[in-house]
Amino acid sequence: SDQRVNVKFNRLIIGSQRFIGYQSPNPFIADIEKGKKFIAIDFSLQERDQKGWLDITYLDEDLRIGRGNVGSVFVLTKVV
C-alpha cells in the first residue's frame, strides 16, 4: 500500500560508542556506506529470512511515525 514499506537490513553493527567512534548519524552512515569495518560485532545479514515492514501512521513534511511488523515504533525526522 501507499502507507507500508518493506524493510530489509544489510548489516548489523553492535559496539560501544567510544570504540566505533560514533559522534553523530551522518558521518557514521557515510562510513557504513563506504564499507568501513568497525571494532565491534559487525557482519552482513542474509536477505532470505527477512520479512519486515513498516506502516506509516503519520506523515508530514518533517516527521513520520510508523509501526513495525514486530510491534516496534519508529519516529523518523527529516535531516536537512
Image: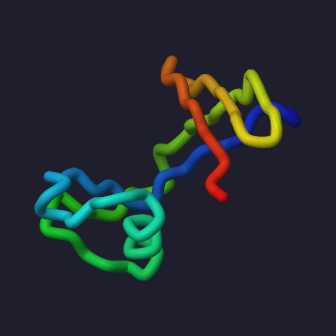
How far from the left and from the top, in percent, is residue 15? 17, 53
- Residue toward you, 22 or 12: 22
x and y percentages locating residue 68 in the rendered image: 57, 27
Instruction: Name the residue furthest front.
Output: 80
- Assign the C terminus to one quadrant of the image: bottom right
Q: How far from the left and from the top, in percent, is residue 20?
A: 19, 64
Q: Nearer the viewer, residue 6 or 13?
A: 13
Q: Residue at x 41, y 70 (%)?
A: 27
Q: Which quarter of the figure has residue 69?
A: top right
Query: Where 12 falls versus 20 (above or below)?
Result: above
Rendering coords of residue 10 (x, y %): 45, 60
Q: In this view, does 1 lie above or below 50?
A: above
Rendered position, 72 above or below 39: above
Position of the N terminus by quadrant: top right
Residue at the spot 53% in from the left edge and 23% down from the top edge: 73
Task: Reply above or below: 11 against 50.
Answer: below
Q: Looking at the image, which is closer to me, 29 or 80?
A: 80
Q: Which residue is farthest right? A: 2
> Could you tell whether 57 is left or right of 50 in the image?
right
Q: In this view, does 12 lie to the left or right of 16?
A: right
Count of numbered labels shown in the rendering: 0
Residue found at the very far top of the displayed protein: 71
Residue at 49% in and 23% down: 72
Residue under the point 32% across and 55% down? 12
Colour mode of the rendering: rainbow
Q: Is residue 50 left or right of residue 13?
A: right
Q: Which of 58 and 69 is in front in this view?
A: 58
